[in-house]
């Protein structure tokens, strides 16, 4: 029973995603065939803007302030003081005190190590590059549709002009 309901939910999700993608493609074709060339650029501009917002969020996170609420960033690593954390390894307690992350009186059993943030410039640049390429795939597809529709429109307009000149 659980497998069948899971499959139905997955099929429903894929149907919704497929429907949204179909509507976007049909909308792009419709807007690209309009007289004004700017209408066909609306969806690609929105898609590009959303990808730029995601990149902005990545850049802002990479240069986040060193302390945010219960989180402390030290030497490129994120540490979160968590009240519910009980089994923190004792060998880490000494290392945290040696590195100056914690004062000896701090309750170290409530410290969670969340690993390295990607604040190194090479890593951030790589992530930004990959995100830029991946999130602009829809922009590229929308632009291909736009130029394809506009090219057909341009050819038809040229044929119409030639037929009018032939009649004249």
Image (cartoon, rainbow, N blue to C red):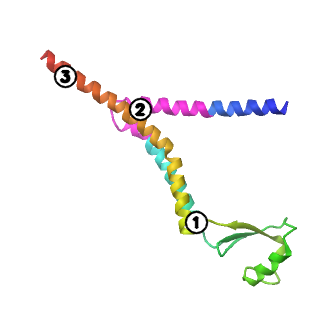
Circle 1 residue: 62
* Residue 32 on the magenta segment: yes
Circle 1: is it few (<14), some (14-19), or many (20+) Cα within 10 Å? Answer: some
Which of the pair 83/63 is nearer the observer?
63
Identity of the residue drawn at 47% across and 49% down: 49
Q: Is residue 158 above or below residue 59?
A: above
Give the residue furthest to the right: 86
Which residues are the magenta region?
Answer: 17-43
Asked which secondary structure carries label 2, the reply is helix
The C terminus appears in which quarter of the rendering? Answer: top left
Q: Examine the image and state in which quarter residue 41 appears.
A: top left
The location of residue 152, given as percent across then percent down, is: 33, 28
Q: Which mark is residue 94?
A: none
Identity of the residue drawn at 42% across and 34% down: 145
Q: Which mark is residue 31?
A: 2
Which secondary structure is most common in the magenta stretch? helix
Image check: 80 left or right of 33? Answer: right
Which of the pair 42/165 is nearer the observer?
165
The CA distance from mark 1 to mark 2 is: 38 Å
Q: Earlier in the sequence, mark 3 or mark 1?
A: 1
Q: Are marks 2 and 3 in contact (CB under 8 Å)?
A: no
Q: Earlier in the sequence, mark 1 or mark 2?
A: 2
The location of residue 57, given as percent across then percent down, is: 56, 58
The CA distance from mark 2 to mark 3 is: 26 Å
Circle 3 residue: 162
Circle 2: is it few (<14), some (14-19), or many (20+) Cα within 10 Å? Answer: many
């Amino acid at each position: 029973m659980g497998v069948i309901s899971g499959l139905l939910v997955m099929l429903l999700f894929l149907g919704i995603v497929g429907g949204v993608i179909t509507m976007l493609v049909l909308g792009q074709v419709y807007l690209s065939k309009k007289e004004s060339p700017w209408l066909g650029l609306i969806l690609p501009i929105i898609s590009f803007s959303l990808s730029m917002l995601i990149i902005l969020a990545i850049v802002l996170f990479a240069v986040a302030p060193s302390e945010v609420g219960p989180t402390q960033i030290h030497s490129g690593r994120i540490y979160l003081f968590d009240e519910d954390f009980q089994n923190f390894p004792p060998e880490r307690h000494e290392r945290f005190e040696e590195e100056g992350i914690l004062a000896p009186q701090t309750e170290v059993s409530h410290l969670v190590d969340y690993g390295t943030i990607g604040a190194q410039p090479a890593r951030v640049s790589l992530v930004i590059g990959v995100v830029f390429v991946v999130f602009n795939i829809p922009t590229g597809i929308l632009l291909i549709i736009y130029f394809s529709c506009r090219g057909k429109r341009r050819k038809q307009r040229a044929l119409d002009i030639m037929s009018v000149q032939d009649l004249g």
